[in-house]
Amino acid sequence: MARSIATVILAAGKGKRMKSDLPKVLHPLNGRPMIHYVIDAAQAVGSEKVVLVVGHKKEMVMEATRERGVEYAVQSEQLGTGHAVLQTRPFFEHYDGDILVLSGDVPLLRAETLRQLIDIHQKEQPLATMLTADMDDPTGYGRIVRDEHGFVRQIVEEKDASPEIKKIKEINVGIYVFQAQSLFETLPLVKNDNNQGEYYLPDVIKIYVERGEKIVAVKTPDVAETHGINNVDQLKRAEQILLERLAV
């Protein structure tokens, strides 16, 4: 029997590079706020609940999504993605299923891709399954190092990567499925000893790997669907991709 799935969508950021006062996730994409595409995908995979983590101008984000049947967790200070997901713990106290973690600024992800991610996670039953992609130029991204069985052995950040690891083109795109109970037990162990002083969600994966836990990586063949929207040019390109999909 398939485990139940719920989704957490990270939607608390400012989006400084958008050069607008509008919260990043509310920028319109072909006439709809980009966050709506992410909610669509979460609901299409059968999420029994969808929790938005809101922060910057949270009232605007809540108003724009209040008819979508979502719930809200507030991240008052933006202290990183791990801290953001930890704010949703009260929504999952008695929940024993899996949690899909999405970003509110990645609106091109297809529901089919997420279904495949969830199906593989539920078949393999690791503590976490992550979405990856091959990039022609992976500079700046965390590289995925797999073991001889194809499971994740390491995520190596660019600054820590040897010349050999820098040749790896498979990157972490920041989309995950976690077993809920283990996730919330592990998040408080994540430290903020980095330059930004933030708590990062990928550090949960690092903790699992150090313990010798099985971590699965599922590679999407379409790297474009994993792209985040960080500036106006990327927003325009995303609009083109969505229009091209409609034309097929």
Image: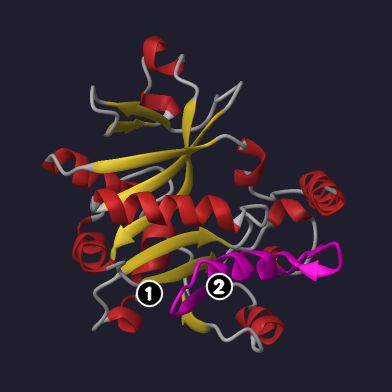
Disc 2 and disc 1: Cα gap in Å?
21 Å
When the figure is inspected, residue 138 is found, relative to residue 189, above or below; the finding is above
Q: Nearer the viewer, mark 2 or mark 1?
A: 2
Q: Which amino acid does label 1 sit on?
A: Gln
Residue indicated by mark 1: 87
Task: State yes or no: residue 239 in magenta.
Answer: no
Q: At which x and y percent is residue 1?
A: 27, 68
Q: At which x and y percent is residue 182?
A: 20, 62
Based on the displayed image, in which of its 4 quarters is residue 59 positioned?
Answer: bottom right
Between 65 and 116, which is closer to the camera in this rendering?
116
Q: Crowding near pointer 1: few (<14 within 10 Å), some, many (20+)?
A: some
Residue at 54%, 83% (x, y): give it: 70
Q: At which x and y percent is residue 42?
A: 54, 68
Residue at 37%, 39% (x, y): give it: 217
Q: Crowding near pointer 2: few (<14 within 10 Å), some, many (20+)?
A: some
Q: What residue type is labelled 2?
A: Gln
Pick out the residue farthest to the front.
1
Residue indicated by mark 2: 43
Q: Is residue 167 visible?
A: yes
Pick out the residue farthest to the left.
211
Residue at 24%, 27% (x, y): give it: 149
Provide the secondary structure element on which disc 1 rests: loop
**Extent of the magenta region:** 26-55
Q: Which of marks 2 and 1 is nearer the N terminus?
A: 2
